[in-house]
Image: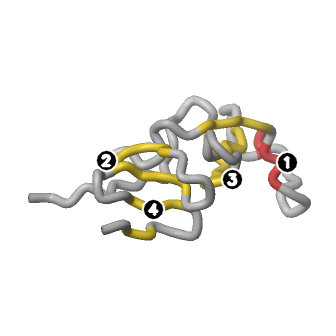
């Protein structure tokens, strides 16, 4: 049975996580976005509501991290995070036993 995770992702019966728009596999249950494309940009590129310079609030470099489907480039996730840290927005679809 295919499970719809959100508007853009689904989990297939074999455990693969795929884009609902083009069918490209982007990960597996334990790491749903493992094979997705990731692009980092300046936080101000997120839009007009992000105007302040990160240096006013932190000594660390901050980035806008965007995650996309490799097949159709649908944006799957966006976050503003310290550049030297991994994504904090994680998903794990594996069922515990």
Q: Nearer the viewer, residue 84 or 65?
A: 65
State the image coordinates of residue 29 (x, y, percent, origin top left). Answer: 32, 51
- Residue picked out by circle 2: 30
Query: Does residue 78 sit above or below 20 in this rendering?
Result: above
State the image coordinates of residue 73 (x, y, percent, origin top left). Answer: 70, 46
Of the numbered discs 2 and 4, the one sitting upstream in the chain is 4
Q: Residue furthest left?
A: 97
Of labels 2 and 1, the one closer to you: 2
| Badge 4 vs badge 1, beta-carbon distance below 8 Å | no
- Residue picked out by circle 3: 74
Can residue 58 be spotted in the picture? yes
Residue visible at 63% across and 37% down? 38
Of the numbered discs 2 and 1, the one sitting upstream in the chain is 2
Q: Is residue 41 left or right of residue 23?
A: right
Mark 3 residue element: loop
- Residue picked out by circle 4: 10
Of the numbered discs 3 and 1, the one sitting upstream in the chain is 1
In space, the residues marked 2 and 4 are separated at their CA atoms by 14 Å
Residue 44 is labelled as 1
In space, the residues marked 2 and 1 are separated at their CA atoms by 32 Å
State the image coordinates of residue 5 (x, y, percent, origin top left). Answer: 45, 67
Residue visible at 77% across and 43% down? 54
Of the numbered discs 4 and 3, the one sitting upstream in the chain is 4
């Amino acid at each position: 049975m295919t499970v719809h995770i959100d508007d853009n992702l689904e989990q297939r019966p074999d455990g693969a996580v795929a884009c609902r728009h083009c069918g490209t596999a982007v990960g597996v249950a334990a790491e749903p976005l493992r094979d997705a494309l990731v692009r980092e940009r300046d936080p101000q590129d997120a839009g007009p509501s992000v105007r302040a310079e990160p240096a006013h609030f932190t000594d660390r470099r901050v980035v806008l991290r965007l995650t996309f489907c490799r097949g159709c480039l649908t944006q799957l996730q966006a976050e503003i995070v310290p550049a030297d840290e991994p994504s904090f927005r994680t998903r794990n679809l594996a069922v515990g036993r």
